[in-house]
Structure formats: C-alpha cells, structure tokens
Amino acid sequence: MPILSYLLTALGAYLLGSIPTGYLAAKAKGIDIRSVGSGNIGATNAMRVLGKPAGIFVLFADAWKGYAAVKWLPIFLLNILAPPDFDKCGALTNFHSVANFRIMAGICVILGHNYTCWLKFKGGKGIATSAGVFLALAPLAMGICVAVFAVTFLLTRYVSVGSIAAALALPVAVWFTREGTLLRVVTIILGALAIYKHKTNIQRLRAGTENRINFKKKETK
C-alpha cells in the first residue's frame, strides 16, 4: 500500500477524533467546560455540567467518531485512491490490508480525541471514542467490556472505576475473541493509554475525593 494512503488515513482519523464535542456543546451554552466540574471535555463531565441530554449527546457523538473512523473512513479513502487491492469493480481483494488501515484509524481517532489540536492538544480520556473504535474492530470484546464497566460502575458508583476496569478487561477480551497479533498489541497500548488518562481520577480515588454517581433522587421538602 502506498505510504500516502496510510498518512491520509491517519490524518483523517486524527482530525475526526479531534472534534471537541463536549467543549462545543458547552460553548453553545456559553460555558467553558474546561473550567467547571472536573475540567474534562468528555461525556461524564458534560452530563454533570450540562445535564443528561447534553451528556448523552456527547457520549454518542464521541463514540460515533471512533466507529466512523474505523468502519467507513479507510474504505472511503481507499476507494478514492484506488489502490491495487481493489479490483476494477471496486471490490476489496485483500482483507488484511484494509484491516491494518482500520487499526491505524482507530489509534489516530483516539489520539485526536485525547490530544485535540483545537484545544492546545488537551482533550478527553477517550473512553467513549475507544468504545466506538472497538465496536467496529472487535464487537464481541467490546460487549464484554461494556458488561465489565456496567457491573463495576453499579457496584462502586464511580464512572472512573468502571472505565479503568473496562480498559483492563479490553486486552484480555480481544486476546480471546480476535485473532491477529497487531490488534492484540495495539489493544494493550490503547488500554494502557486509557488508564494513564485517568491518572487524576486515580489520585482523587486514593484521596477519597472522587465524585460518585448518586442514583437516589434528592428529597424535596
């Protein structure tokens, strides 16, 4: 495959991931989300600061970035560039080549979200975007991680703990449900990155100052 194809895939995925959904949603309401709550531009802080509808929108938008970058962007670019792995009818003749493009797109869209060029290379933690990436790359493994997140979150009521548990479970789930050394190695790296991005949450957990989600409605007098 031409180096240009890989470069354009990486750049396109990064730029898609770099769209700061949470920041833009808050900015539309006159709020700089970086200066309120945890200061993170992700869905959890957006939900806490902007309310559930906005938080859910940010969650799905960030996940969509990851899914779209992996599922559609490589095929779109490869069709435009017409590489030798496509026949005269535009049918893919080398599955493994496009799989490598998708893995690269997955890496770069997460990096775009975590280190967006539009906010001085400061972004979110990449959990929702990673979920979209692995929904496209390894849906069964992603389903396992969602279950791990849900159980851990319900037991602890910490979104951060659920996210860290899912990041730890992801490489294991991919190892047992998907073949391919490259994907397995990349998953370990991305899982480690997700945990690293939660370093401030880990510090707050150790200090006992991390915010819990309260399922009980406040009583009104």
Image (tube, rainbow, N blue to C red):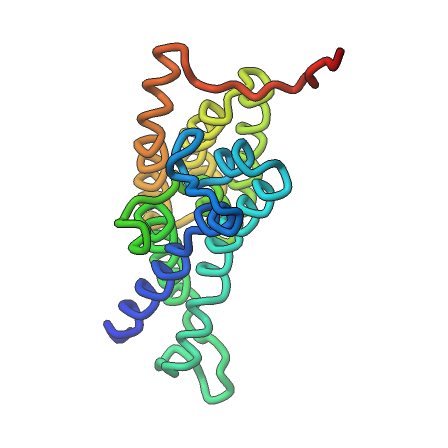
In this view, the residue farthest toward the right is 221
Name the residue rendered at 47%, 49% in the picture: 27
In this view, the residue farthest toward the bottom is 88
In the figure, 52 relative to 86: above or below?
above
In the figure, 201 relative to 133: above or below?
above
- The front one of 69 and 101 is 69
Left or right for 84, reference 160: left
Name the residue rendered at 31%, 50% in the picture: 119
Q: Position of residue 146 (x, y in %)?
A: 56, 35
Q: Position of residue 30 (x, y in %)?
A: 48, 47
- The front one of 189 and 18 is 18
Could you tell me which quadrant the N terminus lies in?
bottom left
Could you tell me which quadrant the C terminus lies in?
top right
Residue 132 visible: no
Left or right for 51, reference 32: right
Residue 152 visible: yes
Q: Position of residue 23 (x, y in %)?
A: 44, 47
- The front one of 182 and 186 is 186
Q: Position of residue 114 (x, y in %)?
A: 34, 45
Q: Quadrant of residue 95?
A: bottom left
